[in-house]
Amino acid sequence: MTRPALVVFTRDLRVRDHPPLAEAARAGPVVPLFVCDPAVLSSPLVAPARRAYLRDALGDLDAALRARGGRLVVRHGPFVDEVLAVARAVDAEVIHLARDHSPFARDRERALRAAAAGIAVRTWDHLTVVPPGALRPAGGEAFRVFTPYWRRWREGPWRPVVGAPSRLVVPDTAADRPGPELADLPLAPLPGGERAARDRLARFLRRGLARYAETRDRLDADGTSRLGADLHFGCLSALEVVRRAGAHPQGEAFVRQVCWRDFFTQVLAADPSAAWRDLHPPRRPWRDDPAAFAAWRDGRTGHPLVDAAMRHLAAEAYLPNRARLVVGSFLTRTLGLDWRRGARHFLARLVDGDVANNNLGWQWVAGTGTDTNPHRVFSPRRQAERFDPDGRYLRRWLPELADLKTPDLFDPPPLERARRGYPPPIVTDLRPRPPR
Ligand SMILES: Cc1cc2nc3c(=O)[nH]c(=O)nc-3n(C[C@H](O)[C@H](O)[C@H](O)COP(=O)(O)OP(=O)(O)OC[C@H]3O[C@@H](n4cnc5c(N)ncnc54)[C@H](O)[C@@H]3O)c2cc1C
C-alpha cells in the first residue's frame, strides 16, 4: 500500500485551489492535519475574533473533507512535535506545507525540517497570487514601491486555479489530540470558513464589485468586500479571487487592492525583520506618552473621526481601510507615537489581522516603510468631510454627538462638547509632532 502524504493546513483552510491537497489526493492516501499551537493561539496578538473565525473555519474544512470521504485531524500542542507525531503514527512519506513568510512561520518551517529526519518536507506557494520572489526589481530582492510591482504583477502569468479533490482516502491511524484553545469563544464577527467566504465573494462580485472604485473609501457606505479574514486564513484563494474579479469589466480597482497583499508579502519574505523593524528610520524619535496612547485606543481623543473609528474597531473587530489610515496617521504622525504600539493593538483586535498587511500598512502610514512620503498626514476633519460628508459614520459611532448638525459634527464647539461629555481635542496642531 502507498504510504500516505501528510497535508498540514495552516493559513490555507480550504479544499478548492489547494495544490498540495489536490496532488496528494491524486497520488494516494492523505492525512489532512491542523495543529492548534498554543504558542500562536494564546498570543495576545491573536484577536479573540480571529480565534473565533478559525474555529468556524476548522469546522467547515472538516465538513468539506468529510463530504469527500475524509476528515480533518486536529491536534493541540507544539506545532513541530504534533506534526511529527502524526507523520510517524501514519508512516507518512512526505509532509506538505504552505510556504509562509512571517518570522514565526519561517522559524517553524526551519524547525520542522531540522526535526523531520528521513521524512521529506515539501513547501508550496499558494498563499499569494504570485509567489514572493518571483518578481524582482533590477538589482534588488523585492519591490519597495507599489506601482512598479503592480505593473509587473498584473501581466502574469498566473498559475491556473486547481479544482477540489472529489475523493479522499484518509487512513484511520491518525488520532486527534483535543485541547482547550478554541473552546468557549464568542461568536465570530462574521461567519468563518470556506463556504461562508465563497458566499461573501459571490455576493461581492454580484453586487459590490461594479461600484467598488467609487465606494471603497466612503466611510458611510459598506463599499468593500470584507474578505480580509477569508484571505488571511486562506478560506479563499487570492488567485481565484483576482481571476474571478479580474474577469469583470470593472474589476481592476479591486484586483489592484488585492495586489497590495502580494506586494507586502514579498517585502516581508525578502526581509522578515520588516515585520517589526523600520524599513527606513523615522525622521524623529518616537515620543512616549501613555495617556495619549490610552486616549487613542479608547476613542477619547476629541477628534470625532479618530474616536468613531476606534470605537468601531472595539465593537466589530474590523475597520475600513480609510479609517485605518486616519487613525494610523493620527497615532504616528500627529501624536508622534511608535507605529509598533498601534500595530500590536490592531493585531489584538482585528478579525483580519495579518502581520504582513498590518505591520507594513502601519509602516506605510508612519513613513518608515514602503512608498515613503514624509508629508503624508491625514487630517481627521478633512477626511470626515470628504468620506463621510453627511456625518453618518460619525453619528453611528458617537451617539453623544448624533444630534449635532454638520459641519459642527466634524469639530464640535467647546460648549457642545462640554454639554455632551465629549472631550476637548488632545492636540490641535495636526502637523507631524516633534519629539518632546
Ligand atoms: C494601518 C493599517 C493596518 C492594516 N491592517 C491590515 C490587516 O491586519 N490585515 C489586512 O488584511 N489588511 C490590513 N490593512 C489593509 C486594509 O485596510 C484591509 O485589507 C481592508 O480594510 C480589509 O477590508 P476589505 O476586505 O473589505 O477590503 P477590500 O478593499 O475589499 O480589499 C480586498 C482585500 O485586498 C487586500 N487589501 C486591500 N487593501 C489592502 C492594503 N492596503 N494592504 C494590503 N492588503 C490590502 C486585503 O486582503 C483585502 O481583504 C491595513 C491597512 C492599514 C492602513
Image (spheres, rainbow, N blue to C red):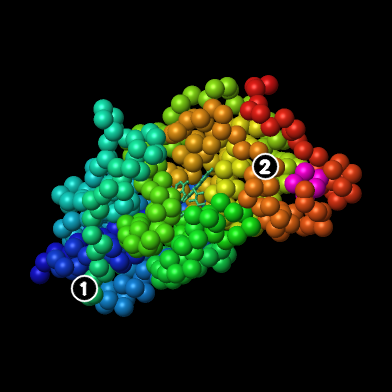
Q: Position of residue 59 (x, y in %)?
A: 42, 70
- Quarter of the image for residue 341 reads top right
Q: Quadrant of the N terminus?
A: bottom left
Q: Is residue 417 left or right of residue 203?
A: right
Residue 382 marker = 2
- Say which amino acid is labelled 2: Arg
Which residues are drawn in magenta? 408-412
Q: Provide the residue designation for mark 1.
A: 169
Name which residue lies at 85% across and 48% down.
Answer: 421
Q: Position of residue 14 (x, y in %)?
A: 34, 64
Q: Nearer the viewer, residue 124 or 421?
A: 421
Residue 13, can we see it? no
* Alpha carbon separation for disc pair 2 and 1: 59 Å
- Quarter of the image for residue 85 reads bottom left
Q: Position of residue 94 (x, y in %)?
A: 18, 56
Q: Is residue 161 left or right of residue 183?
A: left
Q: Nearer the viewer, residue 114 or 389?
A: 389
Q: Is residue 356 magenta?
A: no
Q: Nearer the viewer, residue 64 or 236?
A: 236
Against 145, is 59 above or below?
below
Q: Nearer the viewer, residue 179 or 150?
A: 150
Closest to the camera, between mark 2 and mark 1, is 2
Name which residue lies at 54% across and 41% down.
Answer: 343
